[in-house]
Image (cartoon, rainbow, N blue to C red):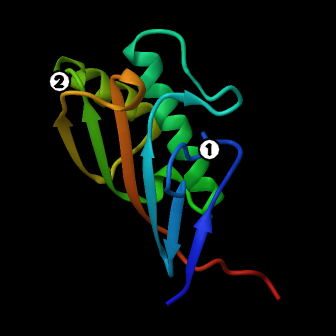
């Protein structure tokens, strides 16, 4: 078993005792992302749609840093402080994913870090890189 810490400046830096992601062999465990803008480490301005979009952008940056893409995500967990925003998650997710979609859970929660409206984490499977001889 090989274990690798994944870190990229293109996604928000960890604000606690965790890594952006951990890669174990071909599986990558992406930590929860909230709508922080990586360059400023502040919450993105705008409504919940802007927050959802920023979270997907953050997940994409971490996925790419681990050698994958969002299409390699096999399990996505979405946490919302207001489930009325669930249709927006579906609409925006459709801009980032194509069928076959990952398995997914959407959970309503009372609160999230920094009083944001959305957080997502994921599990991704990446194939071994093949290099031409």
Left or right, 116 with respect to 11, comes to: left
Left or right, 6 with respect to 89, comes to: right
Which residue in the protein does label 1 denote?
13
Which residue in the protein does label 2 denote?
83
- Expressed as whole percent of the image width and height from the top left, the position of residue 25 reads 50, 81
- SS of the residue at dot 1? loop
50, above or below 63, in the image:
above
- Expressed as whole percent of the image width and height from the top left, the position of residue 98 reads 40, 44
Q: Nearer the viewer, mark 1 or mark 2?
A: 1
- Expressed as whole percent of the image width and height from the top left, the position of residue 52 reads 41, 26
For marks 1 and 2, the one nearer the N-term is 1
Q: Residue at the right extreme? A: 133
- Expressed as whole percent of the image width and height from the top left, the position of residue 87 reads 23, 23
The answer to which of 104 and 11 lies nearer the viewer is 11
Left or right, 101 with respect to 54, comes to: left
27, above or below 99, in the image:
below
Residue 133 occupies quadrant: bottom right
């Amino acid at each position: 078993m090989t274990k690798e810490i994944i870190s990229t400046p293109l996604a928000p830096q960890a604000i606690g005792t965790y890594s952006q992601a951990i890669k174990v062999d071909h599986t990558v465990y992406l930590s929860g992302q909230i709508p922080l803008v990586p360059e400023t480490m502040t919450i993105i301005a705008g409504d919940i749609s802007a927050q959802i979009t920023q979270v997907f952008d953050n997940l994409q940056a971490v996925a790419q840093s681990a050698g994958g893409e969002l299409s390699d995500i096999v399990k996505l967990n979405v946490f919302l402080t207001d489930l009325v925003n669930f249709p927006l998650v579906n609409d925006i997710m459709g801009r980032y994913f194509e069928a076959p979609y990952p398995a997914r859970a959407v959970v309503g929660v009372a609160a999230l870090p920094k009083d944001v409206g959305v957080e997502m984490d994921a599990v991704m499977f990446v194939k071994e890189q093949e290099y031409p001889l």
